[in-house]
Image (cartoon, rainbow, N blue to C red):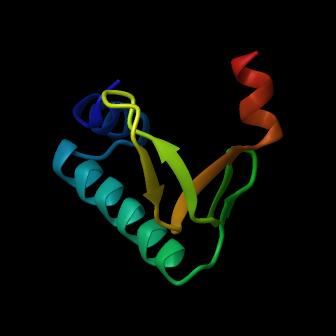
Amino acid sequence: MNKGDLIEAIAKGSDLTKADAGRALDATIEAITKTLKKGDKVTLPGFGTFSTSKRAARTGRNPATGETIKIKAKKTAKFKAGSALAEAVK
């Protein structure tokens, strides 16, 4: 499923036009992104939790040359599925 398919499914399931569903999806993604940028969590009961975590700096290896390289520390986004979602996917 891509973004267009998701917008269509939202429109069908909620009696919205595709344009309104697209704007709603964009607003949802934007709100989640802004919250994660601040370092806060977004919890959707039954669906899951979006959060951030810090990755420490580490050394890696270039697979093409075998050369050792330094990988910088960074903050990454994580998603942990809620129990209802995990059970539905089983």
Q: How many marks?
A: 0
Q: Position of residue 22 (x, y in %)?
A: 24, 50
Q: From the viewer's perspective, tell me whether residue 61 is left or right of residue 43.
A: left
- Vertical arrangement, residue 81 with respect to residue 28, above or below: above
Whether residue 16 is situated above or below residue 49 in the rendered picture: above
Q: Nearer the viewer, residue 74 or 6?
A: 74
Q: Position of residue 80 (x, y in %)?
A: 70, 46
Left/right placement of residue 37 relative to residue 45 reads left
Name the outermost residue toward the top.
90
Residue at x 17% of width, y 50% of height: 19
* Camera-side residue of 82 and 65: 65
Q: Tell me the quarter of the image containing the C terminus.
A: top right
In the figure, 78 relative to 43: above or below?
above
What residue appears at the point 43 percent right and 68 percent down from the top-left corner? 33
Q: Nearer the viewer, residue 26 or 49?
A: 49
Q: Would you say 7 lies left or right of 80 here? A: left
Of the 4 image quadrants, the one containing the N terminus is: top left
Q: Residue furthest bottom?
A: 38
Measured from the top left, where is residue 15 in percent x and y? Answer: 35, 42
The residue positioned 29% from the left and 49% from the top of the image is: 21
Give the answer, above or below, for where 43 lies relative to 69: below
Q: Residue at x 39, y 40 (%)?
A: 67
Pinpoint residue 77: horizontal percent, then vertical percent.
Answer: 54, 58
